[in-house]
Image: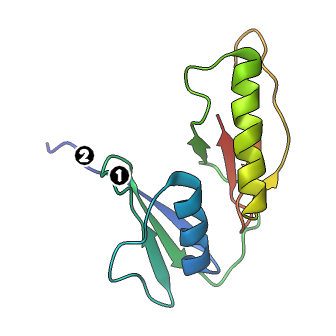
Amino acid sequence: MASVKQVQVTFDCAEPERLARFWCEVLGYVVPPPGGSATWAAAVDPAGSGPRLYFQRVPEGKVAKNRVHLDVRVGTGLRGDERLAALEAECARLVALGAVQVGLLLADDENESCIPMRDIEGNEFCLD
């Protein structure tokens, strides 16, 4: 039995090129040549370590909460106020790109703080 070598994350969306460019800004990814088409776009990690993101146009809009979401890891290794400051700074940057902050989950006995958000097409993700 062969092992999985790569993972691609696929987004159903209305505007593939626009959503790909948004996620490139979020993650520091690039749109690979020759680009996409009217029905799809992709984004890749220029360092080659992160998964490829694929954006495909679908006719229906988003109607329910995602069952899977991305955690954008900006606070790794940070705790308390330092972590919260890093999350809030990244949140402000992403809101300027068109993302929406959904809430703020403060640290408790089990979990560190995180910020639930939505991308420019309403897909949920968290700043973690």
Q: Which residue is mark 2?
A: 4
Element class at badge 2? loop
Tell me the amino acid under the disc marked 2: Val
Q: Is there a contact, CB below 8 Å, between mark 2 and mark 1? A: yes
Question: Residue 61, which numbered label?
Answer: none
Amino acid type at image mark 1: Val
Residue lying farthest bottom? 38
> Which residue occupies the extreme left position in the image?
1
Q: Is residue 68 left or right of residue 102?
A: left
The quadrant in which residue 87 appears is top right
Q: Is residue 72 left or right of residue 104?
A: left
User: What residue is at 71 percent from the left and 21 percent from the top?
Assistant: 82
Task: Point out the image quarter for the C terminus.
Answer: top right
Q: Which residue is mark 1?
A: 7
Where residue 15 appears, as percent x and y from the top left, is: 62, 81
Of residues 9 and 19, the one nearer the viewer is 19
Give whichever of 18, 61 is nearer the camera: 18
106 above or below 23?
A: above
Q: Residue at x 35, y 57 (%)?
A: 46
Against 110, residue 115 (above or below) is below
Q: Locate residue 83: give its quadrant.
A: top right
Please give the count of numbered marks on the rendered protein: 2
Residue 106 in sight here: yes
Q: Residues within 10 Å of mark 1 (few under 14, many from 20)?
A: few
Percent position of residue 106, x then y = 82, 24
In the displayed structure image, the side of residue 66 where residue 26 appears, left or right: left
Left or right: 52 with respect to 119? Answer: left
